[in-house]
Amino acid sequence: MSKVYIALQDNDESRYIVEAIEESNPDSTVIHQPAMIRIEREGRLVIERAVVEEKMGRDWDVQELHINLITLGGNVDEDDDQFVLEWKQ
Amino acid sequence: MAAKKLNIKDKYRLLTRDLDWDFSYEDRKQAFPYEEFEGIKITDWNKWEDPFRLTMDSYWKYQAEKEKKLYAIFDAFSQNNGHLNVVDSRYVNALKLFLTGVSPLEYQAYQGFAHVGRQFSGVGARVACQMQSLDELRHVQTQIHAMSHYNKFFDGFQEFSHMHDRVWYLSVPRSFFCDARSAGPFEFMVAIGFSFEYVLTNLLFVPFMSGAAHNGDMATVTFGFSAQSDEARHMTLGLEVIKFLLEQHEDNVPIVQKWIDKWFWRGTRLLTIVAMMMDYMLPNKVMSWKEAWEVYFEEAGGALFKDLARYGIRMPKYAETIEKEKEHISHQAWWTFYTHGHAAGFHTWIPSDKELDWLSAQYPDTFDKYYRPLWELAKEQEAKGERFYTSGLPQLCQTCQIPMLFTEMDNPNQNSMRDSVFEDERYHFCSDGCKDIFDEEPEKYVQSWLPVHQIFQGNCGGPGVEDVLSDYYKMNVGVDNMDIKGSPDEKRWNEWKGIA
Amino acid sequence: MPVYALNPGYKGERMDRVENFHGNQIVYVGWDEHRMFCAAKAFPLPPSMPFAAVIENIMPEAFGQHPEFSQINWETAEWLLDGEPFKPQLEASLEAQGVGHKSMVRFKTPELQGFQNAGV
């Protein structure tokens, strides 16, 4: 299985998103680079709205992810409750 | 009762698919005349899926938010003389190359996506291309704004747009996009939307921008990552295009494969300049070009092609050559610019001893053997007061338009040279990849505007190279070009920093 | 297919026809395994130029900056013309010995291995 990855700008909002990603995807790898945070995981990675909202303590729209997103690798599927990155092979 | 909020999927359907209409009295084929000549077969545009399901109302909302953040930082940067915080004046030369070589490509991408966004008969693709087109326009504008601050304090930024259209090395990025934009709409999408956006722009906008942050350049990292936040959407569009074409008809598979082979090769050649920017123009290093290539091309691209194997798509042709070249191209490119420093619109230099050691450590198999001796020679020449600027004009590749600087991977001391004869005229190429592209469509590439040949034809002013530089390229000769040592840029920097 | 175009029979303009060079032709010269020069160099030359003039005038301009240049033995240099082994005839013109428009002339100097013997 290949790795999916996502990179976010290193800022206050992303820190909560990264925390949420770590909680929703227990064996993901978080890599800190200058000004950015890269998260990798085998096969699949999910960002759940409910978990992000809990970390941020406010409502969060999944599409707000666009503001802090730098890059990603994998097939994307997004709806109101979650954002999924996945390789099927 | 309050109106119920639409969910993303319903909103996407209403604000995208619902914007289309049937043609009752016009012929649909005449309305979309570019859709068939490339041989691509589309049976059902409704199968198009936009995974982000972004609609125009949300698009404006989030883009406005990105812009507000970005411009707040630009203001802070310029109010606080942010240019003084960059690591040293050499770094700024990477930005000159960025503004003259990359930002105008954003403008070309804007034009290209506006065009294909008009030409697809499927509404989902049209809306996605419209957004990407607006993104690209935003990128060129924010980049010009960011660098207008540097233009007040450093040389070489003032004529970026004019230079892009004329300067010898800028014909490389310019012709890359002209090639894509003059192709049909589906090839454009595979070229730019997929090959370039999905794999290759990452190498420019992620490790290089992270490098900008590491070198104290707050403005560049901010526009870079702001642009890149759109890029994630572009990547997803690029991948969607590929999957859509491959699922529509099996006859599309060989055509798409041919375009992937072509555009990965074209893109790899184009990125030579980024390789050099990372290894030689960032004084504080984040990662080597080789490492960036392994992460973003070999690993990320490898996963992508594994995923596409189910459609019968394989890795791009010459992937093995590309893998070997990662050890060489940054060194070859910087040597080329160093030795042509009299004809470049930015400054060049011999890497410091510390940097040479870093390169040896990053490239243990190639640097000391092939490239350190070049710099030893350059140092000797400089010590004799004969800083090496090469005479004459180089031979260029007919396809990528890069000087024929690449070498054979089984003998890295020897330049790689290929040629083809088409209708009694000989054409030269830097590689098998570039030769294949020409041989597939010679009628297209006989039209290459090769700067060296244009100078010899008398189309760029003259008679001397210096006249071409000053009058035709609009470089401030003796100010914008030559070594950083002794340049006005260096002198001002030392005054600001109190360096004797 | 020579091009994928909207209209059949599309012909591109040949930008570098020999007629565009005011009586000259382009000749490329390259010194094998001497990477001090990043690439072969291009020169507009009259087709009637004898090869001796290429060696006397063009080669020093192209490669004279190299520390080994003065040691080149032109008698023993090995030549390739458009990829084929070639023996230059010094008195004959470029045209007469098959050096045409956009021909590539390469030479090898087996006794000279470049700066630090590193192919530089």
Image (cartoon, rainbow, N blue to C red):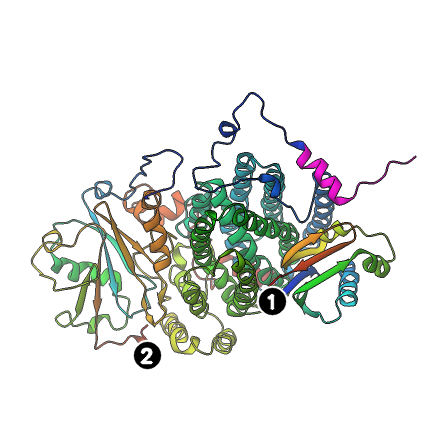
Q: Give how far across and how far down residue B10 sits, in percent.
A: 75, 41
Q: Residues within 10 Å of mark 1 (few under 14, many from 20)?
A: many
Judged left or right of residue B137, residue C116 is left
Q: Is residue B158 above or below residue B205?
A: above
Element type at marker 2?
helix
Q: Give how far across and how far down residue B121 sits, in percent.
A: 56, 35
Residue B400 inside the magenta-drawn segment: no
Can residue B431 be seen in this snapshot? no
Q: Residue at x 12, y 51 (%)?
A: C95
Q: Residues within 10 Å of mark 2 (few under 14, many from 20)?
A: few
Q: Amino acid at mark 2?
A: Gln
Depth check, front residue: B350 or B260:
B260
Judged left or right of residue C120, residue B34 is right
In the picture of the structure, the residue carrying the numbered disc 1 is A2
In the picture of the structure, the residue carrying the numbered disc 2 is C116
Q: Which residues are magenta?
A: B1-18
Q: Amino acid at mark 1?
A: Ser
Q: Residue at x 37, y 58 (%)?
A: B433
